[in-house]
Amino acid sequence: MRNLKLLLAYDGTDFSGWQTQPGAPTIQGTLASAIGRVTGENVLPQGSGRTDAGVHALGQVATFATESPIPAANLVNALNDVLPAAIRVLDAAEAPPEFHARKSARAKTYHYRMYRRVVCPPFLARYVWHYPYPLDEDKMQEVAALIVGEHDFTSFAAVDAERGRAQEGADVGQNAEQNAGQDVGQDLGQNVRRILFSAWERRADELVYTIRGTGFLHHMVRNLVGTFLLVGKGTIKPADLPRILEARSRSAAGATAPASGLYLVNVEY
Amino acid sequence: MRNLKLLLAYDGTDFSGWQTQPGAPTIQGTLASAIGRVTGENVLPQGSGRTDAGVHALGQVATFATESPIPAANLVNALNDVLPAAIRVLDAAEAPPEFHARKSARAKTYHYRMYRRVVCPPFLARYVWHYPYPLDEDKMQEVAALIVGEHDFTSFAAVDAERGRAQEGADVGQNAEQNAGQDVGQDLGQNVRRILFSAWERRADELVYTIRGTGFLHHMVRNLVGTFLLVGKGTIKPADLPRILEARSRSAAGATAPASGLYLVNVEY
């Protein structure tokens, strides 16, 4: 049995997120169908983590087991031929048997794109959050830097009844056990995550947030962006961040930013 | 009665073209609804010409008559608030009573974007024609230059039963009479058009065609691109172009290139 690793990019706009669900178009389900058409096998590829409805990927990683003799290099074209144009396989490679897209992940990077001009070009509407109102970008930079390091991010985790206590890790694991396996540091508490990089950057008409960390809770990046926005608007101050973290309560932080601006950029192993 | 002129950009992917039609989402129909919501008036805005299903615009111009007292400057935000994000009003201004978006047009510019790498990023799929196969770009440049000037473009006009003889001018007028009014030169024959600029340009991973002319027949730009592609592939030579023009027959030219790569860039008055 071969263990194949795919590098994927997708426009998440028209999908109900990564994870398969009945009666809804998902990235995982669409990819499974494509693999089925190419290999004749019925397999469910495992992603490095879930992405929510409308969230995009520049470098999602997925693995699947196959008996197919198709060379990995040929698989790129074969899968792209049957996938919709909104999902592209960028690379395919053999992986060691023990390699697992989610459990072997050591860090992930996300971007969040905010478009700042008054009128958002129609060609960007699916790919950014259009926010044309005044923001103190220096203050947003200041607060973003405060989350680098290890923190309990409960205040930034989706309160997700369906997933019970395991509101965490929806994009990196389906429950606390899996999630612990995903994180680099096994010593971290349930909602504690280690952030390695967190900064905003001006790119022409966009304000782009980059965050790199060893693990993320469900909705964590979008909830951070929504909270940084409150700082940019002057509703709260950077100095309020420690209090928000300490509250360990979703209601202490800002609203969830729209999915359209979020990109899973890459996964490190 | 005021005569208002709108500058529009749109992502044509999810629309059945410019012109209103029952039971299908169109740019004109969606814009008419938005104007109705903002002014309370029932008006049909007139565009500089039709664009087909899937064709985009960076600078479409439309006019409509209104009794509304809303200042033109306020209309931009008011319309964008009720329009879908795929259609944006970039500018609104008072126009002289005799100004007509189509009849007053003196020239138009289109772009056609071809994406050349093997894998097309999912975020570009709606906005280019993905053509990754080998092409002789110098030869495509050579043949593109040959259409500058006045030519009978019957071989590049859609054979469009619905529009009868007036297959021409579908993007600049609905019949020959209107179309004659649109062209700068009243002395041009029915399918004769004057092309002022025609060239390909490399822009990173894209090959972009720009054409500027005083009038265009229905499907003309896409049929030219499809024919230039045959030259790029070596199926025909640049020297075959005069023969194709002289044939005055659609079957003499190449296939119609996909709508996704075509943009109405601007209209000159």
Image (tube, coloured by chain):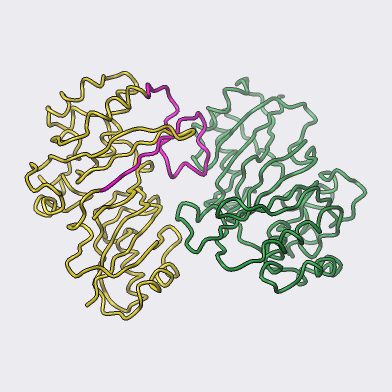
Chain colours: A yellow, B green
Dominant SS type (magenta): loop
Q: What is the x, y in percent for residue A252?
A: 18, 27
Q: What is the x, y in percent for residue A22?
A: 27, 61
Left or right placement of residue B52 versus residue B34 in this view: right
**Can residue B88 be found in the magenta stretch?**
no
**Can residue A111 be found in the magenta stretch?**
yes
Instruction: State the residue at coordinates (61%, 38%).
Output: B8
Nearest to the observer: residue B215 or residue B129: B129
| Rendered image quadrant of residue A66 | bottom left
Nearest to the observer: residue A182 or residue B192: A182
| Rendered image quadrant of residue A49 | bottom left
**Where does the magenta region start and end?**
A108-137
Instruction: State the residue at coordinates (15%, 49%).
Output: A183
Q: What is the x, y in percent for residue B46?
A: 69, 40
Where is A39 relative to A103, above or below? below
Left or right placement of residue A67 versus residue B3 in this view: left
Q: How many marks?
A: 0
> The C terminus of chain B lies in which quarter of the figure?
top right
Instruction: State the residue at coordinates (45%, 28%).
Output: A132
Most extreme residue toward the right, as rendered? B187
Instruction: State the residue at coordinates (22%, 20%).
Output: A239
> The N terminus of chain B lies in which quarter of the figure?
top right
Where is B164 relative to B216, above or below? below
Left or right placement of residue B106 versus residue A208 in this view: right
Left or right placement of residue A78 versus residue B166 in this view: left
Q: What is the x, y in percent for residue B103?
A: 79, 40
